[in-house]
Image: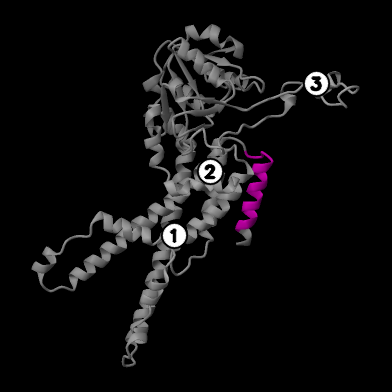
Amino acid sequence: MPDVQALVNDFVLKLKRRKIEGSHASAQHTAELLRSVISHQRMPYTNQAGALIDAVKAVGEQLIAANPVELAVGNIVRRVLHIIREEDLSSTATAIEGLGLSAGSDDDDEGQHEDRPALSAAALAAAARSTLRAPSLQTLLEDIPDSAAAPQPPSSGGDSEGKSKSADKNIRSRKLKHDVIEAINELIQDIDTCHEQISEQAVEHIHQNEVILTLGRSRTVKEFLCAAKEKNRSFRVFVAEGAPRYQGHVLAKELVSKGIQTTVITDSAVFAMISRVNMVIVGAHAIMANGGVIAPVGINMVALAAQRHAVPFVVVAGSHKLCPLYPHNPEVLLNDLKCPSDLLDFGEFSDCMDFGSHGGSPLLHVVNPAFDYVPPKLVSLFITDTGGHNPSYMYRLIADYYSADDLVVKRRSTS
């Protein structure tokens, strides 16, 4: 796959150089890349799902290792692995049911056909899981044509039967790949429209004459507030500026352009202003399996202030930000340290050097973390493109999107 490998290398380089930032862009590009990988993957005669899983895992490990802090990349890799398993399970169950129906049609006795028990769900699942395993030696021996076991008169029937089986196998492999690609297309569509799905719920949570506080700049928060304004909701927004990058200034301009009354405050003024606020609405970088939130730095301070004054703390985020890992996992205990120039100009460091006693080592150190961790007890409600959920329900929601067997992708890449 020379063309696909070039795409993978280019995307890995962009992740390493931080050319692609943000959960939404990272998730969308990852899904599109994995779709290309699957579409160019050559399917073997047996274990087609296993071949797709191995190909996606090989690419996924490279992407995750390129920028482990961008958790959305790992989320999409695991979502695609889950899609492959689900589609293979569905196609295998359909094939087994078809075999049962064909066997029943060969029986002339209708009474015996009615008495035959139907295949149980456990049998279908077991047969589907077996397709993900490599064929054993016994299985290969059992698949030897009958002509090797007992001589049969030469005829064209055996050749035609073998060709029909091979054609049927090829059709099934193409159908599996087609179904997986269609499911990935739906995933990409969900990522594209997640902001619209979340914004439709704005009128249910924002009411007349409320005061809302947010910090920094989040596209999801902006779309959520603008949707409420379009529904003739009258409210006011306090925007904490989000130092040191001051993305709150950008959000304030965007809200004012939509006719929303906006007040910019400093981050240190959050505790002073929180008593006037009816609700806090913020975005997220990732939502963990325990309901905790990886969010832009400073949001944990806002959550503590909201808890102190009994103000609802609402997190709006797309389902692609749902991460099946827990915050105590070693691969999650990372933070992205931004450039010190966001805080101080490089020229200011010259006065902080002691060249006499410390060999030129700086006495002043600048730490500029990008993310905070907000524990689930500080979150009142999550609003995703699937609806509103309590923090205690997030693990159930995550279980619908990921398979337990695919959680090792991240650990394998960091080992």
Q: Residue furthest right?
A: 356
* Residue kind at label 2, given as amino acid type: Gly
Q: Which mark is residue 363?
A: 3
Q: What kind of element bears circle 1?
A: helix
Disc 1 from disc 3: Cα separation? 57 Å
- Proximity of marks 1 and 3: CB atoms separated by less than 8 Å: no
Is 31 rendered above or below residue 278?
A: below
* Residue kind at label 3, given as amino acid type: Leu
Q: Residue furthest bottom?
A: 153
Q: Position of residue 44 (x, y in %)?
A: 48, 68
Q: Quadrant of residue 175?
A: bottom left
Judge left or right: residue 89 versus residue 99: right
Instruction: Please give the name of the residue rendered at 31% of the width and 90% of the height, measured from the top-left corner.
Output: 152
* Residue kind at label 1, given as amino acid type: Ala
Q: Position of residue 248 (x, y in %)?
A: 60, 20
Q: Which residues are magenta?
A: 4-20
Disc 2 from disc 3: Cα separation? 38 Å
Q: Which mark is residue 74?
A: 2
**Does the magenta-highlighted stretch encompass residue 237?**
no
Judge left or right: residue 264 versus residue 199: right
